[in-house]
Image (cartoon, rainbow, N blue to C red):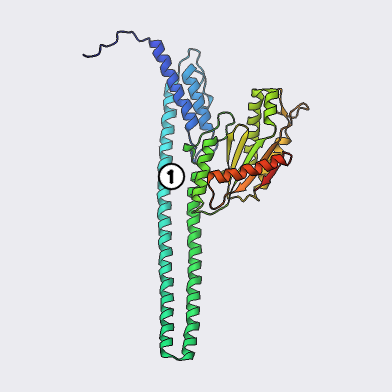
Amino acid sequence: MSAKRSTETIDPLSLADGALDTLGCVFQTLSRESFALDTEVNVHEFSENCLEIARHVENGAAAPNIDIEECETGSREWGKVRRFFVDRRKQEKSYVAGRLNDYRSIVEQFMLGLRDICDSSDATERTVNQSLESIENAISIGSLPDVRRVLAAAVDDVSEAFDRQKHEYEQQIAGLNERMSTLREDLVAAREEMQLDALTNVYNRRAFDSAIQRHISTRIILPQPISVVMIDVDNFKSINDSYGHTTGDALLRFVADCLTRSFVRKNDLIARYGGDEFVVILPDTTAHNSATSIRRFLESVQSTPFNAETDEPGADDDGLVVSCSAGCTEVHEDDTVESLVGRADGALYRAKESGRNCFRID
């Protein structure tokens, strides 16, 4: 028995409202899930533009960054909205295609480098075999002077072959490292798999987990130092209880802002680990060398009193002086994410035990 078509009348206004809400949600999602392109200086600019577009779609608000003015009649600039979306998708397609070509080129160069190393090993092996044959021939003749002469020549030939091979290895590995550095930087900046924390506008826990796993995996190929810093706001619970959650949220945003001003390199990754705890990944940095940036951050937090009444940093005498503690460790060869975070957390705990407002290095 066939189903009967519904005779209910669809309300056009309700349908239009649902469409606008859905389209606004699309742009809000695009804001959260977007990734930065090479041409973008401000990585948050596109996200902000998406939010402006979403507000314009939903209620006709102005979108100054997109050159859309607010209209008294509530009409929408649909042409500019479509152009904004289409242009972005074209840029992302070009970006992804370029990155895929870069990856293919890096893999090809890596394979060529390995092949050169194997060829060099074959040449060294031939030199060693020839030297062994010369020694065997001299021994079979039985002349001691000849044996001594052949042995001395064999030692020189083999030493020269290994020195030459070592030099070639160093050159080839240096070239491979340079090529692989590009891949590593891209992995660090893999924005498409990373999300921002909605409260603090730094990366969230998922972003950190993804990035640190990549660092641990690529360290086998590119063995350079990587440090991880765990950071905790001192006495945050009591501040939150005394001044309220609104102040607590503003305080977390303030700490995140101090972090972004202290760890300024392009490849440094700052994330909110959970609650009042933050984490920073410092590529190409030993735990010892990270001390300068950590100290700069701690001083930045403490030297800027936080006004609990206005929920903003300021020099008010009544401002709340905030401090943080930190623990730092360096990635080991056999590390997992759990073992690495465990050591950093242990160093943070020791900093808390030492009186807070300080840092410890594992």
Out of 297 and 229, give the one closest to the viewer: 229
Q: Residues within 10 Å of mark 1 (few under 14, many from 20)?
A: some
Q: Which amino acid is tagged 1?
A: Arg
Q: Name above or below for residue 269 compared with residue 180.
A: above
The x and y percentages for residue 152 are 50, 83
Furthest toward the right, the residue is 317
Residue under label 1: 99
The x and y percentages for residue 164 are 49, 70
Horizontal relation, residue 361 to residue 30: left or right: right
Q: Is residue 185 visible?
A: no
Q: Residue at x 70, y 27 (%)?
A: 239
The x and y percentages for residue 121 are 43, 68
Q: Quadrant of the N terminus?
A: top left
Horizontal relation, residue 134 to residue 357: left or right: left
Out of 144 and 109, give the one closest to the viewer: 144
Tell me the SS state at disc 1: helix
The x and y percentages for residue 32 are 50, 30
Q: Within the image, what quadrant is residue 276 found in?
A: top right
Q: Is residue 103 visible?
A: yes
Q: Name above or below for residue 83 compared with residue 139.
A: above
Q: Within the image, what quadrant is residue 252 found in?
A: top right
